[in-house]
Image (cartoon, helix red, strand yellow):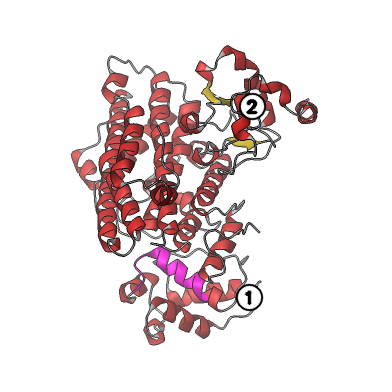
Amino acid sequence: MSHVVTEECIRCKYTKCASLCPVTAFHEADEFLVINPNECIDCGLCVHACPVHAIYPLEILPEQYDECVERNARLSKVLPVIYATHEPLADADMWKAVPNKRQLIDATLLAVTNRSAS
Amino acid sequence: MKIEKERLRRTLARRLGVEPTELANENVTLKEILEISPTAINSIDIMEAFIGSLVDLGAQTDLELPAVTLDDKLDNTLDTIVSAVATT
Amino acid sequence: MRIITNLVEEIKNNNLSLSDIMRIQHAYHESRRWSVTELLKSKQIGTVSRRDKAILWQAARAEITTQPACIRLAVDGLKLANELEGKNKVGNTVAHSAAQWSARYWLEEEGHHEVAYGTVMEMAGLEPISEEEVIGHRGAFPTDNFARVCMLQACVEIEACVAYGEVAKTSENPLVKQVFAKITADESQHRAYFISFARALVECGAYPLKDILSMAYTWIRPKGGETHGSYREKQTKREGFVNWWQNMKTDAGDELRMDDEQFRSDRLQEKKVRAVLSAVEEGTGFALKTAEDLQKVYMQSLAGEVQLGDPLIAA
C-alpha cells in the first residue's frame, strides 16, 4: 500500500507534508510533489497536513485520480527527495480550487520521465 | 595538520571544567572523567568536549573522528584523535 | 486536526495559550485513537513467520521502556518550565506543552503499543514476558538536557518508524501487518512532536542550536553512530534500555534473531540517516545531505559560526 499525491498539489506545493514524513518518501518537481510508494509506510500524517487535501491513502483514492498512482511511482524514481517544508509556490492560494490541473504538468518533465522509465 | 597531545589535553580540561592535572593519569577512563567534571553529565558532553576542543585548536570540519566509548582510556583516545587529525 | 510544528511562532504571533495548545494536542490524539481490544478481538493470527516472531519479541520489550521515558520527559519538562518561569515566557509555555503532551498523550499511546505487541507476541506462540523482565524494562532513564532528549526521542521514533514500517510493508500475516501499521503511524506523529519541541526550545533561546545537532550527530555519525546499535565496533556497556536495540538477538542459531534485512540492511540504514537529516532540517532549517555535512555544521555551531536562521547550507 502507499499514499498518493494527486493533481491537487500542482502549482500549490505547500510542502507541509514533507516535514512530517518520517521516511522521506516525498519527491519534488518544480510545481508539485509525489510519494515514493516503495518508501511510504502509510503512517498517514501527510493527509491532514495538506491544505488542499491532495493526498490520499491508495485504498480510498477517488477514481478520478487513478492515473496519479502510476505518476507517483514513476516520477519518484527520477525526482529529488524533499526533506522539509518550504514556502508554497507564489500563487498557491489562487490555484487551490482549480480543477483538472493534471494537464498543467510540464510535458517536458513527462517526456524525460518516460524516457527514463523505458 | 598537527595537534600536540598535551595541548589537546589542556584544551579538553578547560572544556570539561577540570584542571589538566586531573586528566594526567594515563589510566583514567572517560567514564571517570565524567565523574569529576562539574559540567559534563554523559557521553554526549564528552564527545562535545572532544570535538569542541578540536574546533578550538583549528581542526578541519571534515576530519574523520574516531569512535570512542566511556570505557576507553583518555590517553589512548587522545593518541587516536591526534593521529586522525594528522591525516588531514 | 494537526500537530503544531512551529510552536514558538504560534505562541508569539497567534497568542496560543497552554490550554489552546492542549486542546489542539487533544483533538489530534482523539482523531487518531484506536482500540487494541477491538483490533485483536476474536482475531485468529494464523501462521507467523520466524522473522515476524523475532521482531515481535523485540518490539514487545522495547515498548515497555517507553513508560519510564514518557514519565521522565513529563517530569523533566515541568522542571524545565519551572526554571524558565519569569525568565523565558515562551520557553515556559513550550516546556509545559511538552510535559503535558508526554504525560497525557504520548504515555497513553505507548501503552497501546506495549499491550498490542505483547498480546500479538503471545498469540504468535511466544512465551509471555515475565514480570521480572517487565519490571527490569521499567527502570529509570538517565537524564539529559531537555532539547537533547527531545531530539534523542525523535531519533528513537525514526528507528521505530523504519523498522516497524518495514514489517507493515513486508509481513505476510494480515494481523501482524495491521498492528505494525497502526503503531508505525503513531510513532510517526511522535517523531513530529519531538522535533517540534526540540525546534521550539532552540527558537525560544532556552537551548543552543548545538544541542539539536549534537544528538543528531551522535545518532548517525559514520563511525559509531547510535543507529548502528550492536553492530558498532565499540559501544559503552549501558544500564537500562535507552537504546533497546543494543540488546537485540542476532546470533545465527537463535530462532528469535533479527536478520539484517529486517533492521539494519544498507537500505534501511540509509533511510534512517535520511530521516534524521530531515529531522535536523525541520528542527534547524539546515538542509544537510550527509552525516559529514552534519558534522561540519555541528562543529561550526561549536565555534559559534552558525546560528539558527542562518541561510547556510550544506557542504
Say which element carries label 1: helix
Q: Which residue is mark 1?
A: B86
Q: Which residue is mark 2?
A: A72
Q: Which residues are magenta?
A: B39-53
Residue at 52% across / 60% down in the picture? Answer: C308
Say which element carries label 2: helix
Judge left or right: residue C248 versus residue C126. Answer: right
C19 over A68 or under it: above or below: below
- The question of residue A62 being in magenta is answered with no
Per the picture, the main secondary structure of the magenta-coloured stretch is: helix
The amino acid marked with disc number 1 is Ala
C188 over B63 or under it: above or below: above
Judge left or right: residue C260 versus residue C254. Answer: right
Residue at 50% across / 85% down in the picture? Answer: B6
- Nearer to me, C311 or C140: C311
Subunit under mark 1: B
Which residue extends farthest left? C131
Q: Quadrant of residue C176?
A: top left
C192 over B28 or under it: above or below: above
Judge left or right: residue C157 versus residue B80. Answer: left
Q: Position of residue A86 (x, y in %)?
A: 58, 44
Q: Position of residue A79 (x, y in %)?
A: 69, 36
Q: Position of residue C45 (x, y in %)?
A: 35, 18
Q: Is residue B41 visible?
A: yes
Label 1 crowding class (10 Å Cα cut-off): few <14, some 14-19, many 20+?
some
Q: Is residue C66 visible?
A: no
Which residue extends farthest top? A63
B23 over C161 or under it: above or below: below
